[in-house]
Amino acid sequence: MAKFGPYEDDNIFAKILRGELPCEKVYEDQHVLAFNDINPQAPIHVLVIPKGPYVSMDDFTEKASDEEIGAFFRAVGKVARQLELAEPGYRLLANHGTDGMQEVPHLHIHIFGGRKLGPMLKTA
Ligand code: DGP
């Protein structure tokens, strides 16, 4: 389960950003890295992360610069187009905190696609 204190440099995505762990890179620019999820939940399942040290969407939208926020959301759209998902469509998801069941405490947006994705949330 996620730790929701200050950013911790030993999280998995920080290690990927530092090149200490491998990833299947899909996209990279000055502010953003995107790579395939290790445990895909759809035929296409990509994670988009900012390079800055932000725990979650909450942390990011409070502390990141306008440039970082702009670059991040531009990159999400760019990656989806690069994956040819604009048609027929895709789903974005960002888990935050305990109820959101966030596992990795470095902000990430999931991009899902490649099939009809079904209802937005399963009933518990
Ligand atoms: P979340 O529950 O929203 O925090 O999603 C975390 C995602 O991160 C989950 O779908 C699996 C993925 N993941 C965890 N460890 C690794 C890893 O080492 N490499 C990659 N590529 N993905 C990982």
Image (cartoon, rainbow, N blue to C red):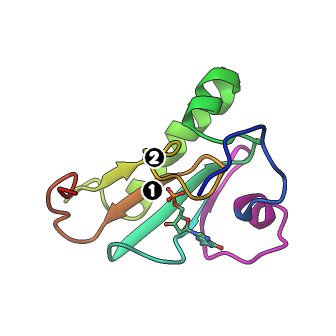
Residue 62 appears at what percent x and percent y?
A: 64, 21
| Residue under label 1 | 110
- Of 66 and 42, nearer the camera is 42
Which image quadrant: the C terminus? bottom left
Mark 1 touching mark 2, by CB under 8 A?
yes
Q: Left of 115 or right of it: where is 93?
A: right
Query: Between marks 1 and 2, how big is the CA–CA gap?
Result: 6 Å
- Of 106 and 3, nearer the camera is 3
50 vs 61: above or below: below
Check if residue 83 falls in the magenta segment: no
Query: What amino acid is at disc 2?
Result: Ala
65 vs 87: above or below: above
Query: What amino acid is at disc 1?
Result: His
Residue 91 appears at what percent x and percent y?
A: 30, 53
| Residue under label 2 | 94
- Mark 1 sits near ligand 1, with its Cβ under 8 Å away: yes
Residue at position x 37%, y 71% in the image: 44
- Mark 2 sits near ligand 1, with its Cβ under 8 Å away: yes
